[in-house]
Image (cartoon, rainbow, N blue to C red):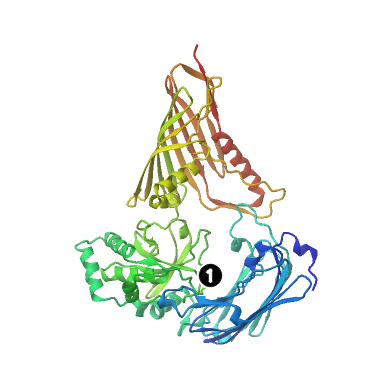
Amino acid sequence: MLIPKELTENANSIVRKQNIEINILSQKLMQINKLKVITVLNSKGLSNIDAIEYYDGSTKVKSIEAIIYNSLGVELKKIKRKDFIDQSVADGFSVYNDNRMIYLDYTPTEYPFTLVYNSEVETSNTAFIPTWYPIDDYYESVQESSISIKYLPNLGFKFKERNFTDDKIKRIESSQQISYQVDNYLAKKHEELSPSFIKNNPSVLFGLDFFNLEGHQGNAKNWNEFSSWIYNSLLKDTEALPEMTISKIKSLVGTEKDPIEKAKIVYKFVQEKTRYVSIQMGIGGWKPMLASDVDRLGYGDCKALSNYTRVLLNSVGVEAYYTIIYGGNSKQNILEDFVAMQGNHAILSIPYNKGFISLECTSQTSPFGFNGNFTDDRFALVVKPNGGEIVKTADYNEEKSKQIVKANCKINENGDLIARLNYKSSGIQYNQKSQIETKSKETQELHYKELLNWLNALKINSIAIKNDKESIEFIEDLDIIVPAYASISNGLMFNLNVFNRTSFIPQRYRTRLNSFEIDTGFLDEDEVEIEIPNGYIVDAKPSDIVITDKFGVYKMELKSIADNKLLYKRSYLLNKGSYAKEEYENFRSFSEQVSRADNAKIIFKRNL
């Protein structure tokens, strides 16, 4: 089958034919057959092969195979099941040995090549009906793709279409069956600042009102019934803890009455006792391992550690709820209008002031109640014994994601700069920096030299770091020397912004295709005193600057506070938000103005 030329443009791979057939035979039986024919044009297209299946005691891979062809259609290799790699999803942890994956690891000898992949899977878990992505990556074209689902009407089959912005995708419905098909979907280039692929491209979610998961028959008619089912079927029988552990945690809490203070003690106990083992939601099952096993082994995945922390908190009278969420730096919401298994991560929610404090139970270092950009600002499902609710997690907005820089600098007759500077960071800016604390001195030095890469020959005399987890503030103090920072050829000339320059200017596109997104905003405030040698006066200096736009506000001002001392003040507020592609050039212009202002120079001459 010839490939139309337009499908090769901007493509690393081309899906020649993809067909997924799903047959839901009962509440406890689903068959999934996959055929995928993909031509891989170069090494970047290898990741789109997706020849992988997961299985456990409830899911069987009945058959799996692949055939490789060269560009002339000559068969190069036939890959049987025994040639696939079959391994545990968490090798070395006996409690998870039931959860495995089988996948193809193929190293090509030539490009392009074509792979034909077939698999047949049978599962009793009807809670997870695969989502259909007509196209699932940038730089991939689709010649033909389809999905067909047969179902029983009494199971309450449902579906939700997302981002259907054109008529390329055809939906066909008949009695007890639904199908989707797309032909000739052209590859898309990735553009800087584009929203996540899932936000901008079509997909279809499927679900059942009445389903089965790990031997438990469930109800997903509404969030209350679904949440009650999760608690009673998946959580309730995991709660037993050894009496010794309960006594220990009660002893640690002592006479403390405040529930939040109690929770801090328990959270610290969990962080010190356990470590995280990665098992993705939906692969390792949705049922957490027993709290007693976590207590005994000292490790678990997000489900296990969140549930373990919940049980410990309940044992000392603190109300806490298991919470399902989409974790990741790219924000994704639990869809409130589609009741079904969603999410890929679990956290804990503690009621507080008519809202919730979220706990990331997989981290041994996170401050209490701080989640950073992995689970911030998105909707999650709080699971309660008698129902549940969709809630939004904490939003670390621009004002909360703040960095304050204060510095005292001195420039000597040789143009060398000697400085003491202090950074204080909170919110997402705290999140971005907090791991520096655990690094070696050598690694810390490299970090700051990279951060301040415009300071040539930077010498760092001392670094002092304080991670204030109570106020969730990261404090950095540095003593530095920058040889020949100021040019001394005809006086003194140097850049006023010593420590916090913005050089980012988005890439230019002749024709922007996608909307764009600033997913994290921030506020920077800088105050720098600069002392120069006696006997110099200002020859040329920049005017004070104010740049105001919908994207943010930038301000810079310069004051003389003594005969040989200046005060440089700068603030930069960048607003998070989603914007139409037509506004992209305006954002580029705003970024250029900020970068230009951050490179403003001052010139001094000798006062003869």
Residue 34 visible in the picture: no
Give the camera-side residue of 562 and 173. 562
Label 1 is placed on what type of residue?
Answer: Asp
Q: Is residue 400 above or below residue 95?
A: above
Task: Give the side of residue 63 with respect to residue 1, left or right.
Answer: left
Residue 397, how many percent across, how many down?
46, 50
Question: Which element type, helix, strand or loop, lies under badge 1?
Answer: loop
> Residue sitting at 53 percent across and 82 percent down?
126
Give the camera-side residue of 461 and 10. 461
Residue density around tag 1, few if under 14, some if 14–19, many if 20 or more, within 10 Å: few
Residue 563, how many percent across, how many down?
42, 19
Which residue is label 1 attached to? 337
Task: Give the side of residue 156 with respect to residue 567, left or right.
Answer: right
Q: Is residue 270 above or below residue 68?
A: above
Task: Give the side of residue 269 with respect to residue 587, left or right.
Answer: left
Residue 115 sits in quarter = bottom right
Q: Is residue 362 above or below residue 177?
A: above
Give the camera-side residue of 25 and 84. 84
